[in-house]
Amino acid sequence: MSKTIKELAEQATTIEYGVDNGFDRATFDKEKFAALIVAQCIQAFGETRFEPSLEKYILTKLGIEK
């Protein structure tokens, strides 16, 4: 998993402290994660007017190797 994807996953995770007899609980919000990825893609789209490949640029920005 790329560094960027890991960072987005962390942003989509909420940790609740002191739940269930003192244990922490992490909740992953799939919708928020998807929204963060879409936001990255939209930002990349705005940066790529002169790039030859939007797909390659977005994958590179997200740290994904194809």
Image (cartoon, rainbow, N blue to C red):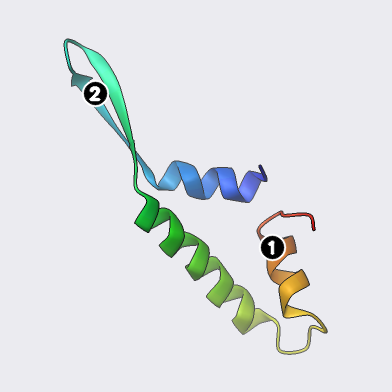
Helix, strand or loop for disc 1: helix
Quarter of the image for residue 50 reads bottom right
Helix, strand or loop for disc 2: strand
**Amino acid type, label 1:** Lys
Q: Local crowd at mark 2 within 10 Å, few (<14), some, or many (≥20)?
A: few
Residue 9 on image: x %, y %? 48, 45
User: According to the image, label 2 marks what residue?
Assistant: 17
Residue 35 on image: x %, y %? 42, 64
Is 34 placed left or right of 1 in the picture? Answer: left
Which residue corresponds to the image point at 26% horizontal and 14% vertical from the top-left?
23
Report, in whole angstroms, how far the alpha carbon at label 2 lies from the one at label 1.
33 Å
Q: In this view, does 66 lie above or below 13?
A: below
Answer yes or no: do the residues labelled 2 and 1 have beta carbons within 8 Å? no
Q: Is residue 65 above or below residue 26?
A: below
Residue 45 on image: x %, y %? 62, 80
User: According to the image, label 1 marks what residue?
Assistant: 61
Which residue corresponds to the image point at 50% horizontal and 68% vertical from the top-left?
38
Q: Is residue 31 above or below residue 40?
A: above
Q: Local crowd at mark 1 within 10 Å, few (<14), some, or many (≥20)?
A: some
Q: Extreme top residue here?
A: 21
Is 64 placed left or right of 33 in the picture? Answer: right
Quarter of the image for residue 48 reads bottom right
The quadrant in which the C terminus is found is: bottom right
